[in-house]
Image: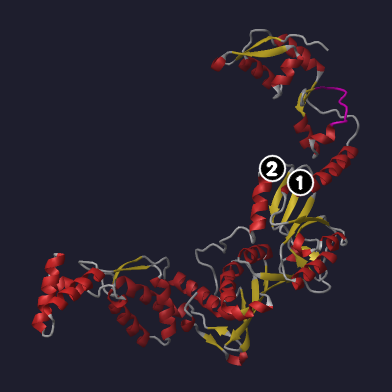
Amino acid sequence: MLRKDLLRVSRAGGGYHPQFADREHRPLAARVLGTFQDHVGETRATLEDALTELERESEDFKLVRGLASLVERDARFETDAAVDPERAREAVFEAAEAVGVVTEDERAMAFIRAGEQLDVSADDLERAMYADLEERQVLDAVEPRWEPDDLLAQYNLSLAQTALFDATELRVRTSDPKALVTAIKRLRLMYEIRRPAGGDDASSVESLASDREVIVTGPTHLFRATRRYGTRFARLLRTIAGAEAWHLEATIDDRGTERTLSLAHEAPVSVPDTEPVADVSYDSGVEAEFAARFSSLDLDWDLVREPEPLATGTRVMIPDFAFDYEHGDFRVFFEIMGFWTPEYVEKKLSQLSGLEDVDLLVAVDESLGVGEAIEARDHRAIAYDGSVRVKDVASVLREYERQLVADHAAELPEELRPDGEAISLAALAERHGVSEDALVDKTFPEHERVGRTLVRPSVLEALADELAVGLSLSEAEAILDERGIEDSSAILAELGYRVEWEGLAGGTLVEREPTDE
């Protein structure tokens, strides 16, 4: 953003219109860049004089200052002094007190004595005394990130951000709503998504794009702190402008007068060489902790952050997470309800009432006392205190899993006749798009089940002839691998062998001793 005093807006017609730079300002942008580069090694005061002269020649001093403020971010100013200025002042003042400075000669003597103490000349000492003042600092280097065209693009983005600094509400339509909502959550902004009445089928993800309006606002009691909230609005513009198509309207508190700012992708606002936004991966510590703990579990569910929007009446909501079952096309949405205001909780319950037909699990802070209300809306609820217990969530997912396994098993024939001489149960389950548990009660007339592998009897007979006592384990595994068998231990045990290990040298097949039944 730019400093507020550098904001250039027009209030014509009661609106709030940023005055963007355009192609005709390219020479001015080049001169600003050149002014900095030409003053490397000179003081800030000298640079400021040159910029002031450029302002006089320009039609708009705020534009010059705005461009210069962006370039200055890539400039490095240093204190150029033979001795630390604070140390120099201390030494000179002590010497002046001893000499009793009244005349010019006495002043010179004080500098000479202080210089001798610090081992510098009186002239160097005098220059060092106030070398740390801002205007006396020296431009050591300037390495601008932008060429003139890029500088103008950055200026326009910064100008638009500054114009949004006093916004109290944003209303946005975008071709990339998911990226927008992700950024909103990471910036900890309050929002809702509205869909026009009579819109098309909300079950289609495509239909949830440009025709949905995202409204970003803050709780009423925060409106006294609009400036702090407005800074986050300004940062959000990076993500908005990164979409292919977008339109926003902002309500601006212009020194007590409410004005409307309108921008769209046709405006000269782009995001040059910058990532869209976000310092934080999750919008609450509860979510971050849950995601980390869930990811450490070995479950047949994949955790998805911020899945597709869900229709709820004439609006939509985006749950915090979704769980995707690895062995089929099935998704459970997951929402974490933390401690919110009563008004916001009521709004959330209203959303859940009108939610489309999906499987939704809600973890609700037990202090809210709305678990039964959620259950009454045909959604699963689990209470939590401080952090969401992964064990409780996993328990619900296993209920879904048992039903899915039963459904998948019912869809398969009782007898399965897979192609090939040998196939693992995992590979067969993947082929049918089910989990291995769905194959537990199935029969395989043409194969024998050995461990987690299905093998034709003829293959077992052939292997019995090829394997022999004394073969190294590596040789035996090579024979099995040719048959497509990975589970060597179960097959070897079935054929009457075990492995006798010989330290680091490997193992050798020996006859397996019979066990009493």
Residue at the farthest left position: 105
- With 35 as the anchor, is 10 left or right in this view? right
Task: Assess whether residue 123 is covered by the magenta stretch.
Answer: no
Q: Percent position (x, y) of residue 38? A: 29, 72
Q: Is residue 131 visible?
A: yes
Residue 212 at least partly seen: no
The image quarter containing residue 242 is bottom right
Q: Which mark is residue 31?
A: none
In this rendering, position of residue 108 left or right of residue 257 = left
| Left or right relative to 410: residue 94 | left
Tell me which numbered mark, 2 or 1, is placed earlier along the sequence.
Answer: 2
> Circle 1: is it few (<14), some (14-19), or many (20+) Cα within 10 Å?
some
Q: Amino acid at mark 1?
A: Ala
Q: Residue at x 77, y 9 (%)?
A: 514
Residue 349, relative to residue 416: is it above or below?
A: below
User: What kind of residue is marked 2?
Assistant: Leu
Q: Looking at the rendered structure, which numbered label has been put on residue 394?
A: 1
Give the secondary structure at mark 1.
helix
Residue placed most toward the observer, 181 or 467: 181
Q: Residues within 10 Å of mark 2 (few under 14, many from 20)?
A: few
Tag on residue 297?
A: 2
Where residue 512 sits in the image (x, y, percent)?
72, 10
On-image quarter of the C terminus = top right
Q: Main secondary structure of the magenta part?
A: loop
Residue 228 pos. (x, y %)? 56, 75
Q: Which residues are magenta?
A: 440-449
Asked whether disc 2 touches disc 1, contact meaning CB atoms under 8 Å apart, the reply is yes
- Viewer-nearest residue: 63 or 348: 348
Q: Image quadrant of residue 37?
A: bottom left
**In-front residue for pair 36/227:** 227
Estimate the x, y position of residue 398 in percent, counting from the top left.
80, 44
